Amino acid sequence: MNDTVTLPLTVFIVDDEAPARSRLKELLADCESQFPLQLVGEAGNGRDALEMLAETPAEVVLVDIRMPQMDGIELARHLNKLDHPPVIIFTTAYDSYAIQAFEQRAIDYLLKPIRLGRLFEAISRARDAVPIRTEVLQELTPEPRSNLSAHERGRVLLIPIDQVLYLRAELKYVTVRTAEREYLIEESLTALEKEYSARFVRIHRNCLVAKNAIAGFEKGGEEGESGWLMKIKGLEERLPISRRQSGVVKEYGK
């Protein structure tokens, strides 16, 4: 006799439309007769989802792609920073071109209106699936994220990109500086420069500054630098400008 008990697969729903969440809950209830499931929560936006999933982890997250403020793909990138990232199944009404992009990357999705058989198939595969790699998610959307995210004490903290004054690479981390505090994130400065080229300017090989945070320039700096320091709005510290990037003084010092 086999006494093995199959633990239910924990599921979380994220969709900004309440009727869509209700529909998914009904379909999940129908799946339970054949597959042990436990709905651990739901959220109407990405911010709430991050907070709730940090407190109550789920193995599978059903994520709507088109949501205001933070789309589902950006949310998935932030979820990847949790201690135990969930498997993401996107729900989408995207056109065929976007769906083809998902299929090429072996990312599971449910096309709205969602059918019971398709949901059951996706959930059944999820137990053996692995989280989507962050770089793959990045390839799916040309739009820059509205937030960066830092992992602190088991939680994911969102940092609105419009509050970031500068980004400075230090060893394997990047320091994110806002007016209030510093955060550490594990991302590439080069990748961040590419993603936010319209917002930041490089002033040194290890530093990007938000263009709207530039307060002016003054002479100074260490030997081997350009001889200029950048002043940042709201901060006392000065950032050195390298010789290679000295053109920013002329461009932004008008």
Image: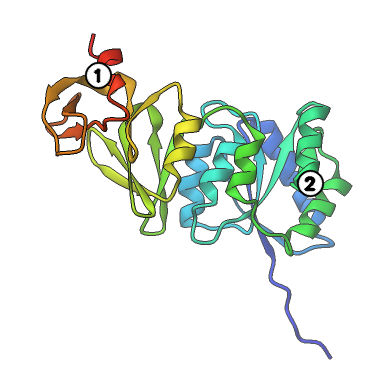
In primary-sequence order, the first of circles 1 and 2 is 2
Q: Which residue is mark 1?
A: 249
* Residue 78 as seen in the image, left or right of residue 114: left
Residue that appears at 60% across and 31% down:
16
**Quadrant of res 40:** bottom right
Q: Relative to residue 49, is residue 11 depicted above or below?
A: below
Location of residue 111 with respect to 4 vertically, above or below: above
Q: Is residue 130 left or right of residue 110?
A: left
152 sits to left or right of 102 = left
Could you tell whether 165 is left or right of 192 in the image? Answer: left
Q: Provide residue 220's location: percent of width, then percent of height.
A: 11, 30
For residue 27, the mark is 2
Residue that lies at the very extreme toward the bottom in this rendered image: 1
Q: Going by the picture, which residue comes out furthest to the front? A: 224
State the residue at coordinates (54%, 61%): 84
Horizontal and vertical percent position of residue 36: 75, 64
Q: How is the image coloured?
A: rainbow
CA distance separating discs 1 and 2: 59 Å
Q: Amino acid at mark 2?
A: Leu
SS category of the residue bearing label 1: helix
- Front tag of 1 and 2: 1
Front residue of 192/31: it is: 192
Task: Tell me residue 199's x, y (percent).
Answer: 41, 23
